[in-house]
Image (cartoon, rainbow, N blue to C red):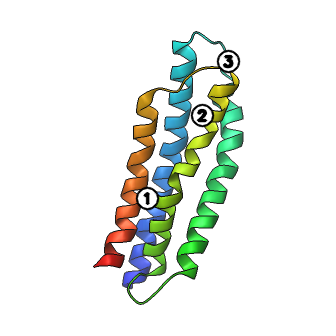
Amino acid sequence: MTDLQGAWVTTVFLLVVFSVLDVVIQQFALHFALARARVAAPEIAGMRLFALWAPTIAVWLATGIALGMSNASRTCSSADGSSLWLGLLYPLTAWPPFWLARQVKVTLPGWYWIAQFFPALVLVLLGGLPCLL
């Protein structure tokens, strides 16, 4: 296996883990906010959230990978560049529960934003460090 193949295997593994973790954290945060406000709207944190999350993740993946592939250079491989761009664009995946919470007039917990920051940081470091070194 070449270094580039190994980098893509690592990047894809982390993308799968972070994509699943993203929707789990979003659903938990939305259910938490609904329960704390005593709002009975489980459909909001179920299929409606998933219906917004799936296209958001697809656009995030397509955009990040396309930017990483188009900007590959001698010092930064396509896998590292994609990881860097995906990390920089990751905050865009946080909007579905925020939008749904506003529809039912509840506030997402503060830890939600911290939990969304961690995967973005990991992806930026994973892609950015090899490009800088």
Give the residue displayed 61% in from the left and 73% down from the top: 66
Mark 1 vs mark 3, CA separation in Å: 32 Å
Disc 1 designates what residue? 14
Disc 3 designates what residue? 41
Disc 2 designates what residue? 98
Give percent across and percent down for residue 111. 41, 31
Give percent across and percent down for residue 51. 72, 41
Give percent across and percent down for residue 127. 39, 69
Seen as rendered, the residue at the extreme bottom is 74
Q: Secondary structure at mark 3?
A: loop
Could you say which is closer to the camera, residue 47 or residue 80?
A: 80
Q: Verify CB contact (< 8 Å) between mark 1 and mark 3.
A: no
Q: Quadrant of residue 46?
A: top right
Mark 2 vs mark 3, CA separation in Å: 15 Å
Q: Amino acid at mark 1?
A: Leu
Mark 1 vs mark 2, CA separation in Å: 24 Å
Q: Amino acid at mark 2?
A: Phe
Work out whether mark 1 precedes mark 2 in sequence or the reverse, and give the earlier one.
1
Give the residue displayed 34% in from the left and 63% down from the top: 125
Give the residue displayed 43% in from the left and 79% down from the top: 5
Work out whether mark 1 precedes mark 3 in sequence or the reverse, and give the earlier one.
1
Seen as rendered, the residue at the extreme top is 38
